[in-house]
Image (cartoon, rainbow, N blue to C red):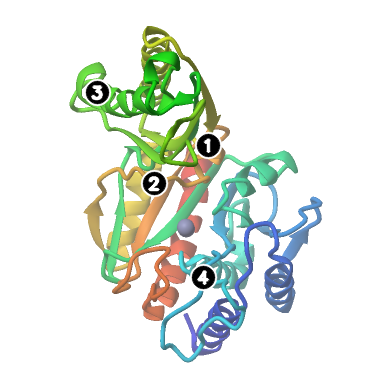
Amino acid sequence: MHQPIAKTIHQLFVTLHQNPELSNQEFNTTKILKTYLEKANIKILELGAKTGVIAEIGTGSPILALRADIDALPIHEQTNCDYRSQNKNVMHACGHDVHASILMGAAYLLKEHEKDLIGTIRLLFQPAEENFSGALQFIKIGALKGVDAILGLHNNPNLTINQMASRAGPFSANVDRIEITITGVGAHAARPESGIDPIVIGAQIVNAIQTISSRSVSGLDAVIVSITKFEGGNTWNVIPEKVEMEGTVRTLTPQIRAKVKQQLRSIIEHIAIAMGAKAELKWFEGPPSIINIEKWVELAKNIARQEGYEVIDFQPQLGGEDFAHYLHHVPGAFINLGSQSPYALHHPKFQINPDMIIPAANYLAKLAKQALIQIDQS
Ligand SMILES: [Zn+2]
Ligand SMILES: [Zn+2]
């Protein structure tokens, strides 16, 4: 990448980092991104996105989509860097500013050789990843129309800036939220026999559902069931009528997701019935797991090696990523590039090493070009 582009992209990163916006409120971010696209004469598609922007380089088919997320988090930044967030209690603590800058860098490079492209690169600067609504919004307005394959990336603070990681198959988790309500009968705390105590029943349920991962599925299948909220009662001498719980279920495959859901419901309902109470489980489906397609992972790894990255085999994670929604419509892959932050994603001191940006943009541009050729030949 020559100097002027590198400088422009670094400036974009600094501007985005200083001006973070929450999910679905990325109005200024969208304006900034559009300005940078217009500066390079890159065609913006008017598909009616409220926030976020979709653009294209090249013409005709095949079409490869590249996706970067652009939203930030409700966190007060606690780094000492001189381009700290200027928006109180909002911070790019997941590095989506970096993802957008990398995609813009790749776009600038691809635009320079637009005539050599076989087909079209569609750029998806997607809003609202953190609340898992952005990918679905983009799909709804037609972001994937005509798309043959899609690639996306996330920075990984645990890797050094010259490391790339991915894997075929499951990459992130099915992320589901649960609410459990247990309704018993309130009573005087000294006369429990005249009521049905939902706290005792709730405690048994919390313990019993931990057997799902150890007794109901193979030890080789990842399952996490976490109860993260347990609420009931308001004083010391009254047995309450109700207990409300919340939590999350994480799994890697659709089969295990369905099995855990069924087993969870069975345990909750049957324990409640056995104790004379009523239980209700509400299951809120979040993003599915990313299931990477092998040939796209292999291509991404090969190009990474050519670009001097050390390629690492990735262990699946039980976090969520709404890129998974795209992969339900078109094949593709999601990868990680090292960002070498001393603090984790979503930490107020999370700080990416910005030296990762330009090499990553170079890599993504090269990968996109090769991906178009691969689609064209298949
Ligand atoms: Zn995040
Ligand atoms: Zn993220």
Contact between marks 3 and 4 (CB within 8 A): the answer is: no
Question: Which residue corresponds to the image point at 60% horizontal and 78% vertical from the top-left?
Answer: 88
Q: Label 1: how many residues lie within 10 Å, few (<14), some (14-19) or many (20+)?
A: many
Q: Is 92 on the left or on the right of 34, as rendered?
A: left
Q: Amino acid at mark 4?
A: His
Q: Nearer the viewer, mark 3 or mark 1?
A: 3
> Residue 357, position in %: x, y?
44, 74
What residue type is disc 2 on?
Answer: Gly
Quote the CA–CA distance across marks 1 and 2.
11 Å
Which residue is at the front of the view, 121 or 112? 121
Dot 4 corresponds to which residue? 92
Q: Nearer the viewer, residue 238 or 312?
A: 238
Q: Quick check: is the Cβ at mark 2 less than 8 Å away from ligand 1?
A: yes
Measure the C-alpha gap from mark 4 to mark 2.
18 Å
* Disc 2, SS: loop
Q: Which mark is residue 319?
A: 2
- Residue drawn at 53 percent across, 88 percent down: 7
